[in-house]
Amino acid sequence: MSQVRFDAVSKIFGGTPALTDLSLEVADGELLVLLGPSGCGKTTALRLLAGLEQVSSGTIHIDDADVTNMEPKDRDIAMVFQSYALYPHMSVRKNVEFPLKNAKLPAAEVAARVNEALATVSLTELADRKPGQLSGGQRQRVALARAIVRRPRVFLMDEPLSNLDATLRQQTRADIVALQRRLGVTTVYVTHDQVEAMTMGHRIAVMKGGVLQQVGKPLDLYNEPANAFVAGFLGSPGMNLVAGELRDGQIYIGGDLVGTSSVADTRDVTVGIRAENLRLADVGFSATVVVAEELGADVHVVCETATHERVVVRQAQHATVPTLGDTIALAATGQVYVFDRHTGARLS
Amino acid sequence: MSSRASLAPGGSVFRRRRDGWLGLALVLPALVIFAAFTYYPFFKNFQMGLFKAAPFPNLPSRYVGTAQFTTMLGSADFWDSVKSTAIYALITVPLGVIGGLVMAVLAHQQLRGIRIFRTIFSSSVVSSAAVAAVVFQVILSPQTGYLQTLGIHLPDITSSPTWGLPAMALVSAWQFVGLAFIILTAGLQSLPDEIMEASRVDGATAWTRLWRITFPLLSPTIFFCGVVGVIFSLQSFGQIDIMIGTSNATYTHTNVLIYAIYRLLHVSQNTGLAACYSIALFVITLLVTLIQFRLLEKRVHYAH
Ligand SMILES: Nc1ncnc2c1ncn2[C@@H]1O[C@H](COP(=O)(O)OP(=O)(O)OP(=O)(O)O)[C@@H](O)[C@H]1O
Ligand SMILES: [Mg+2]
């Protein structure tokens, strides 16, 4: 059993804050995804946990031990780097052996565990190759084998799939999830890809500009986003966000009524509607069709509102696709969210 | 078949030819300088080896074919010089490379004030042979040297047949260590960060990281440093001239090839034989470098 706990952790690089006041717990056996756009501090959080970077303030615990100032080698963690960071001069076997040799395990146990790890990632045949003689996907698996062979308390993975092509990424994603569930090792997984986050994580922690926005189960974040940023970041496409008004609990876009809110207030707001909750209707707010993206099973109809905001409507493939350039009316069929126009905080 | 082949050939050839002229114009100054100071003397040297200098100045020299090469190869002096040169390099290069490596690894630590040490460690590069000679005279002199005042009694290197050559090689290593330090520091700094970090996370101690990761990854740079070191040591001249000199009785023990060439040319005025020695030095440098590439390069790990 291993838990990870960040307590008010901040990291400042020469005056610029990269991570601000992060408090976060990862439960035993959980796969927690750190999700956010480029530069939001995901890697920084991971490197602080690994001990490759020193915190500016705050503490980090693994189980009950305060590891804040511990050397990486004493933390009992394994990390998969974005570039894989394989040792180019060592064979695959030597790469995987390296952490065990450092731990001074008996030779017989080293051999047994290395063989097991190589078999787990189906690399037994390539054990004597050098990393330079492997494909990207194979290198990625060596990096995984090198991590699992340790049986560490925590796995850290920094965008381990970003160098793979789309097909391989999808497959490896499933492999990593299966492996993590089987081994039950507490894992912190960094990505900027929300599909990866939704499909892999037990929970997701969404970050922006070094600040944690929301933590929760994938569907909870999807259905109950805490703010406009989380709403817009999760889902493909992300939630449509359009300037609107709240008048006594009635929600309007461009003067047209689109839904009701539990907040009986009157103010300017940002209105959020998921693409699957919009449909072409006779009455609704008006928008101009810009492009229709055929995805096979469904069609994304991209429109522009009168105030030039982008709105995407998801339609089933067999539905009639409106003509480009036409002005249409859109109505909400599901939940309509309202966010504070300035802070982005969810109002209802 | 490719779309490239369907491009109008006229245009691209024209463009290439113009680029060619521009390129030539740009390298011309360098070519002229190389021709005047490197290529011409280099080939002229071969010609000089075939002519015997007249016993008095201003008289025409005489064509003797390969006679002077035969003389050189049969002379004990020449082979003594070759042996001295070999010993000299065998002391200078390992000492310089290992010294440079130790200093580079030490200075690579992220410590406060490390820049001062980097400057100190690389300072021997900017010291001329004359400065190096004076520094070591101040340290080693049996009459007034530092070591003497510390109670360490040294033989006089200007008269000791045993210690003259190693002492000169030591000065040479001191000179080379700064360059080795700079080359190896650059090598260390270009090692991929993530690999070094991976080894820290993988539980390796600093010592293991050094031997199992840093040195193997640095091996191409260490190899390069060795090649440069050999070439450097084969050309050491200044400190021998200043500290031993041509008049001193022990010069025969520090008579490395480059110094022998100088003596033949300026003391004996024997331009023909000096040219033959120069060619011998060139051939030796070439052979040693080729052998280094053949033998050592196989053991070097180049990262991908
Ligand atoms: N060593 C460093 N020195 C200075 N600034 C840094 C350093 N490392 C990161 N930063 C800054 O900290 C911020 C967060 O960086 P971080 O690498 O954690 O982002 P990230 O979320 O991993 O982004 P990406 O998805 O692009 O990898 C960025 O603004 C970055 O420029
Ligand atoms: Mg990153």
Image (cartoon, rainbow, N blue to C red):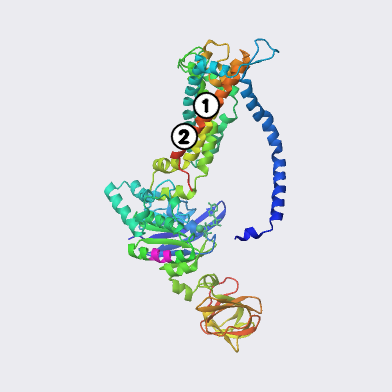
Mark 1, secondary structure of its residue: helix
Per the rendered image, the range of residues in magenta is A171-177
- What percent of the width, then of the height, locates residue B186? 54, 40
Relative to B78, does residue A185 appear above or below in the rendering?
A: below
Q: What residue is rendered at 61% in x and 12% in y?
A: B268
- Badge 1: chain ID: B
Which numbered disc flags the more N-terminal residue, 2 or 1? 2
Label 1: which residue? B284
Q: What residue is rendered at 57% in x and 20% in y?
A: B277
Label 2: which residue? B102
Q: What residue is rendered at 47% in x and 26% in y?
A: B90
Quadrant location, the N terminus of chain B? bottom right
Real-space CA distance between mark 2 and mark 1, rounded to the nearest whole angstrom: 29 Å
Q: What residue is rendered at 38% in x and 52% in y?
A: A75
The mark closer to the camera, 2 or 1, is 1
Quarter-of-image position of residue B151: top left
Residue type, label 1:
Ile
- What percent of the width, then of the height, locates residue B126? 60, 30
- Of the pair A231 and B196, the residue shown nearer to us: B196
- Of the pair B233 and B12, the residue shown nearer to us: B12
- Badge 2: chain ID: B
